[in-house]
Image: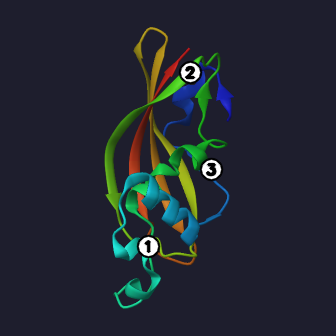
Amino acid sequence: MPFVPVTELKDFIGQQLGCSDWLVIDQQRIDQFAECTGDHQFIHVDPQKASQTPFGSTIAHGFLSLSLLPMLMENIMIMPQGLKMAVNYGLDSLRFIQPVKVGSRVRLVLSLIDAHEKNPGQWLLKARAVMEIEGQEKPAYIAEMLSLCFV
């Protein structure tokens, strides 16, 4: 995770911070997510039934794709120097654009939208996260995510 002085955070606003490595979304990951969340809808966990849908295969849960944000952004999201901890502060917006079919490779492209000191020693960072699907024109989702950083 890159660290920058708090005085330089605003210099990154409007900048693409980078993109993650590609990650394969396999059926095992989808099944494990279904088990954790109790969401066993056939479109996610039954390859035979899902093959009869317009998608032609199982698809990842939208929230599975979203839950990969922390892992995929770890090496590209900038953080203020002196960081003691950062917490998820929520989302300003989220749109699921296209489903992620089993076997697809995805990656995250991250840009900084805003950075400001919310309270003394607390910086609120807003990033635009786009999950790309290899070989697809449209992304899986576009999210504006918020991180509260304590320095």
Q: Quadrant of residue 144?
A: top left
Callout 1 crowding tier (Cα within 10 Å): few <14, some 14–19, many ≥20: many
Amino acid under disc 1: Val
User: In front: 129, or 106?
Assistant: 106
SS label for mark 3:
strand
Q: Position of residue 42 (x, y in %)?
A: 36, 75
Q: Position of residue 44 (x, y in %)?
A: 41, 72
Amino acid under disc 3: Gly
Determine the residue positioned at 41% across, 60% down. Answer: 141
Q: CA distance from mark 2 to mark 1?
A: 36 Å
Amino acid under disc 2: Met
Q: Nearer the viewer, mark 3 or mark 2?
A: 2
Q: Position of residue 70 (x, y in %)?
A: 54, 43
- Asked whether the beta carbons under mark 2 and mark 1 sit within 8 Å of each other, the answer is no
Callout 2 crowding tier (Cα within 10 Å): few <14, some 14–19, many ≥20: few
Q: CA distance from mark 3 to mark 1?
A: 32 Å
Horizontal arrangement in the rendering, residue 73 relative to residue 36 (left or right): right
Determine the residue positioned at 33% across, 70% down. Answer: 41
Disc 3 or 2, which lies upstream in sequence? 3
Q: Quadrant of residue 146?
A: top left
Determine the residue positioned at 33% across, 52% down. Answer: 94
Q: CA distance from mark 3 to mark 2?
A: 22 Å
What residue does disc 2 label?
85
What residue does disc 1 label?
45
Q: Position of residue 133 (x, y in %)?
A: 53, 70
Determine the residue positioned at 45% across, 52% down. Answer: 36
In this view, the residue farthest toward the top is: 120
Q: What numbered label is drawn on residue 18? A: 3
Q: Nearer the viewer, mark 3 or mark 1?
A: 1
Horizontal arrangement in the rendering, residue 83 relative to residue 90 (left or right): right
Q: Which colour style is shown?
A: rainbow
Disc 2 or 1, which lies upstream in sequence? 1
